[in-house]
Image: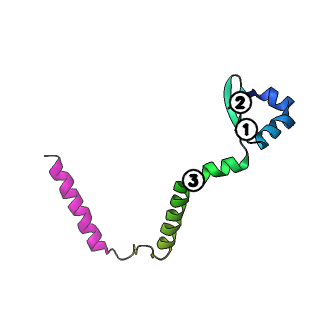
Amino acid sequence: MTQLTASEVRTHLRQVLERVQQGEEIEITQNGRVVATLVHPERLHRRVHTPNTAAAQQLLAGLRADREGVPPPDTTSLSADYAEELVQDIRRQRAGQGE
C-alpha cells in the first residue's frame, strides 16, 4: 500500500484520485502517522459486506421482527403483598450470608 503525506495528497489530489479509481489504496500520513486511507468505494463496500456481515444483519433483522410480536412485560401485576414478601426473603438471605 502506498503512503503519501497529507501535503503530497493536497498537491497532487487529481493524480491521487486517479490512482484510487484504478484500485490502488493510499494511506495518508501526518507527522509520520497514518491518519486516513483512500479506498475505492467498491472495494470498501466489498470489505464491509462479507458473507458473515450479511448473515449477522439477517439474524438481527429476524430478532427484531420476532421482538415486535412480543408484548412488553406487565409490571402492574405485582401486588404490594407479594412485593413485600420478596423483599423480606431477600433480607433474610442477606442476613444469613453475614454469619
Residue sitting at x 57%, y 53%: 50
Inspect the image, locate mark 1, and give the three-letter code of the amino acid beneath it.
Answer: Glu
Alpha carbons under labels 2 and 3: distance apart: 25 Å
Q: Indicate the secondary structure of the residue bearing disc 1.
A: loop
Q: Are marks 1 and 2 in contact (CB under 8 Å)?
A: yes
* Residue 2, x across and y down, in percent: 71, 30
Residue assigned mark 1: 24
* Residue 19, x across and y down, in percent: 79, 37
Q: Is residue 77 left or right of residue 97?
A: right
Q: Is residue 8 left or right of residue 33?
A: right
Residue assigned mark 2: 2
Q: Which residues are magenta?
A: 78-99
Residue sitting at x 60%, y 54%: 49
Inspect the image, locate mark 2, and give the three-letter code of the amino acid beneath it.
Answer: Thr
Q: Is residue 88 magenta?
A: yes
Furthest-top residue in view? 32
Q: Is residue 27 left or right of residue 95?
A: right
User: Which numbered disc flags the more N-terminal residue, 1 or 3?
Assistant: 1
Residue assigned mark 3: 50
Q: Tell me the quadrant of the picture where the N terminus can be found.
A: top right
Inspect the image, locate mark 3, and give the three-letter code of the amino acid beneath it.
Answer: Thr
Q: Badge 3: how crowded within 10 Å, few (<14), some, or many (20+)?
A: few
